[in-house]
């Protein structure tokens, strides 16, 4: 298919652009295969806008006489307005934008056409390979091994080709366990706690069904993670009644009679359309500037967004507590093990592991616990808060995770190497990007699409020194301790940087941030001077004492 077939009117003059925090400006609008481009034709190009079609969530059309107005609502929650003279031109442009922003084929998306203007120093596709992560693990324990049982994705379509499993469990047993777990997602290692040797594993629900079916290999696999005389915890991210209902559909949960050394805890984390509705309500509340305090607080509460944050963080803290304070191993799963499970396992690691609070460590966490673990980004991030089509599989699961990280970062501002701009950038790229990192739903699809060969990795761009400097937290001081965030309602706040970003100017916040950076920089310069003066003083004192000794020894 040629993009030209979808572009009925490639260019329109005398278009008026309205967008947040910019003056209204007139200029030329151009449509290309992947971008909506607006230029005011000014010499300095200050009023230029490049908007990816894939960033467009929905559009609205209005007409007053022959003047057409197109309101473009973006996945990054921005709203822009285009006033276009001429009804035919307006209709043509609107239908072209709708067609170009809803392309079915992944291979027609911009990452397949994007060519970087920067020198690629590091190939991000090879930055966080499982073998490299395993080297770190094998330096502290020899109880685990890499299994290549899924190298052709035939055992579990949503798992990566290489997984980490207990050394005592052979591949034949893994095959049997995969048959017993939803979607073939058998328990695999998520995290090893160096301090006490406890582990966190993740999987999907067991297929026990109404007959209480069992699998001895499954029992053996998860028991292989226990120390002698120790109990483990199974954290099921579904409410007990939801897990019981799943049995009628062939799913279920681990029964105590077959898993006597494990204590099962049910925590209710919502999923799918409930989360999507929550995001829609929250954004609607944030965009409505007309309400009084009571109405605003009522709408914020009815969105339930902060309640979802609290549920996820509480469950992650529970998992971390079991591992660090109880000295117990943990298995986390919900139904499929691709959404709430990953929220919990990745947040627990941020709480427990200082490495995950560095930039490289956090990138490795996203690769390992989200991309390689099979979170279906293509489905979940297909639409954002303004979409008119309500499809079942869209949900802001990853955005909720990033929001939870922001809550912890806000409570521990010196413990993270990255700042909130880094989290904001990840939110934007998960929904629309020139990079191929978040395309596809799992490693299997990415492999078939040949993404490493045909597209650029987000990490190749982010990890360049000139980009990294924007994402570094000036307050960072490495903290090797476990950090315990408060999940009390009073401790949780609305992430203004995402949800009020286009409604309220961040000019003064940005200025205070710049001032803070300058103060820290000046403080470091003063510290260097202090150290230098101390050295000089010590040298002078040494010289004085030498001279005194010389005087006292003379006859």
Image (spheres, rainbow, N blue to C red):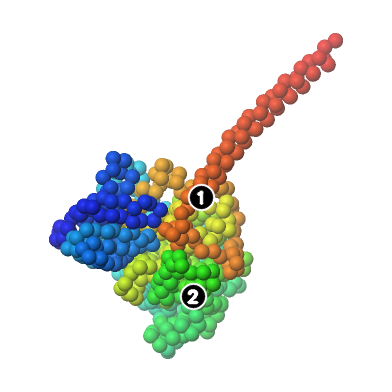
Name the element at disc 1: helix
Residue found at x 48% / y 85% = 241
The quarter of the picture where residue 92 lies is bottom left
Mark number displayed over residue 508: 1
Q: Nearer the viewer, residue 530 or 357?
A: 530
Q: Where does the image place residue 249, in percent across and percent down from the top left?
A: 38, 85
Disc 1 or 2, which lies upstream in sequence? Answer: 2
Q: Where does the image place residue 145, in percent across and percent down from the top left?
A: 44, 61
Which residue is disc 2 drawn over?
302
120 to 252, vertically: above or below: above
Name the element at disc 2: helix
Q: Nearer the viewer, residue 500 or 164?
A: 500
The quarter of the picture where residue 448 lies is bottom left
Q: Nearer the viewer, mark 1 or mark 2?
A: 1
Q: Nearer the viewer, residue 442 or 282?
A: 282
Answer yes or no: is residue 116 visible.
yes
Mark number displayed over residue 350: none
């Amino acid at each position: 298919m040629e993009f030209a077939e979808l572009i009925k009117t490639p260019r329109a003059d005398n278009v008026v652009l309205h967008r947040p925090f910019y003056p209204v400006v007139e200029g030329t609008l151009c449509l290309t295969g992947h971008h909506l481009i607006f230029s005011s034709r000014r010499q300095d190009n200050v009023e230029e806008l490049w908007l990816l079609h894939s960033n467009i969530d929905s559009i609205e059309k209005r007409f007053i006489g022959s003047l057409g107005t197109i309101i473009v609502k973006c996945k990054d929650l921005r709203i822009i307005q285009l006033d276009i003279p001429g009804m035919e031109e307006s209709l043509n442009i609107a239908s072209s934008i709708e067609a170009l922003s809803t392309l079915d084929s992944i291979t027609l998306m911009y990452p397949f056409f994007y060519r970087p203007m920067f020198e690629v120093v590091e190939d991000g596709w090879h930055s966080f390979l499982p073998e490299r992560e395993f080297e770190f693990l094998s330096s502290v324990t020899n109880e685990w091994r890499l299994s290549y049982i899924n190298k052709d994705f035939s055992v579990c379509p949503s798992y990566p080709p290489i997984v980490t499993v207990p050394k005592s469990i052979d591949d034949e047993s893994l095959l049997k366990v995969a048959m017993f777990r939803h979607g073939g997602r058998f328990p695999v290692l998520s995290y090893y706690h160096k301090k006490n040797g406890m582990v966190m594993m993740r999987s999907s629900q067991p297929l026990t069904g109404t007959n209480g079916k069992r699998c001895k290999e499954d029992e053996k696999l998860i028991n292989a993670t226990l120390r002698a005389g120790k109990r483990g915890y199974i954290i099921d991210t579904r409410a007990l009644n939801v897990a019981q209902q799943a049995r009628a559909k062939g799913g279920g949960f681990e029964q105590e009679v077959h898993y006597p050394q494990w204590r099962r805890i049910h925590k209710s984390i919502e999923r799918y359309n409930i989360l999507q509705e929550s995001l829609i309500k929250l954004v609607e509340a944030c965009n409505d500037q007309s309400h009084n305090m009571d109405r605003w607080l009522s709408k914020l509460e009815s969105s339930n967004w902060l309640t979802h944050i609290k549920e996820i963080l509480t469950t992650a803290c529970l998992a971390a507590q079991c591992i660090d304070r109880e000295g117990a191993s943990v298995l986390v799963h919900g139904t499929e093990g691709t959404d709430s499970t990953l929220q919990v396992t990745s947040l627990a690691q941020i709480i427990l592991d200082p490495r995950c609070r560095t930039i490289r460590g956090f990138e490795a966490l996203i690769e390992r616990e989200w991309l390689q673990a099979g979170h279906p980004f293509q489905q979940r991030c297909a639409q954002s808060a303004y979409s008119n089509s309500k499809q079942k599989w869209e949900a802001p699961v990853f955005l909720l995770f990033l929001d939870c990280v922001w809550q912890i970062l806000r409570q521990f501002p010196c413990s993270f190497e990255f700042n909130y701009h880094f989290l904001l950038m990840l939110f934007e790229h998960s929904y629309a990007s020139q990079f191929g990192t978040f395309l596809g739903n799992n490693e299997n699809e990415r492999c078939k699409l040949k993404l490493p060969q045909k597209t650029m990795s987000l990490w190749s761009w982010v990890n360049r020194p000139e980009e990294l400097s924007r994402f570094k937290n000036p307050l960072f001081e490495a903290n090797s301790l476990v950090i315990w965030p408060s999940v009390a309602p009073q401790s949780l706040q609305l992430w203004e940087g995402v949800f009020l970003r286009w409604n309220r100017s961040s000019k003064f916040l940005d200025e205070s941030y710049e001032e803070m950076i300058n103060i820290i920089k000046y403080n470091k310069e003063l510290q260097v001077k202090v150290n230098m003066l101390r050295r000089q003083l010590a040298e002078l004192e040494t010289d004085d004492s030498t001279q005194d000794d010389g005087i006292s020894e003379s006859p």
